[in-house]
Image: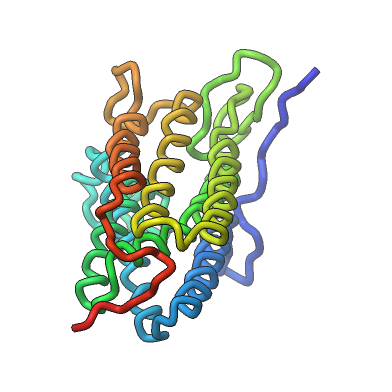
Amino acid sequence: MLCAIEWNPSAELFSIGSFAVRYYSFWWLVGLVAAYFLLKYLYKQQQLSDKDFDSLVVYSFIGIFVGARLGHFLFYDPEYFITRPLEIILPIARDAAGKYHFVGYAGLASHGGTLGLMLALWMYARKTGINLWQTLDNIAIATPITACCIRLGNFWNSEIIGNATGSDWGIIFTQVDNVARHPSQLYEAIAYIIIFVVGLLIYKCLDRKLHRGFYFGFCLTAIFTARFFIEFSKVNNGIFEDFALNTGHYLSVPFIALGIFCMFYRKVGSIELGTVKKKLR
């Protein structure tokens, strides 16, 4: 018979004096480093310059960060950030006495991060002249591994928790309550690592047979379809609390539709992904 597991880890991986590295930051770093080296490999394989790769890193980081913070502000906690606009971008929070303290970034919305990244990559493609669909495909191949690591960070933080299982099975997040809950963070992490492996295998085996935009579409469709179904196991904490579906459901549908369009509408790119050509400026 399955029994609940109590989960009450330390938030800190290690500390040196007053400086502490939290597990959440550690998993973010692991995800970003993994994506960095994979994208560097793809750029080298496709004979794209180191200068263009460095620009990609900068554009992607800014797009994801700004989009994720604004997405959290708009979709999940608008009232809080309307009254505390400084906390949208700065890693600080005001206490009851009105004093500010460094607290890190506690709210990052994946839907907002995706929108921010897409906008940043469009700007990147215009600046560098690299085909936009090629850029989106490259990012899409690396994205699931980073998403997996982020959800592991959420698990360590005991956040984005699942609904009560109604049985003795589940995870008891003791920092939250004493109820056995679905480990929805782990559900997503497992789904994303599977999507990463499948996408990488498709790229290795079928890249010359598929049009540009396919991997971008596959990534959007797979990630947000998984997200849609896993949302049923999560506690609803968005702006659509009184509806049958929650905020994550409604925000996932447009990305799924866009992904399906990119996967099956072959005219998004007339050049096969395996044929690498930089647009002449």
Classify residue 90 by image quadrant: bottom left
The colour scheme is rainbow
237 vs 15, left or right, is left
Q: Quadrant of the C terminus?
A: bottom left
Q: Is residue 222 visible?
A: yes
Number of marks drawn: 0
Q: Quadrant of the N terminus?
A: top right
Q: Relative to 139, is 48 above or below?
A: below
42 vs 117, left or right, is right
- State the image coordinates of residue 185 (x, y, percent, origin top left): 55, 39
- State the image coordinates of residue 11 (x, y, percent, origin top left): 60, 51
Q: Nearer the viewer, residue 252 or 2?
A: 252
Rendered residue at 24%/46% (across/down): 81
Rendered residue at 24%/57% (across/down): 86
Residue at the extreme right of the image, as rendered: 1
- State the image coordinates of residue 247 (x, y, percent, origin top left): 32, 31
Q: Is residue 157 visible?
A: no
Q: Nearer the viewer, residue 133 or 255?
A: 133
Q: Relative to 186, is 206 above or below?
A: below
Rendered residue at 53%/39% (across/down): 188
Rendered residue at 56%/65% (across/down): 34
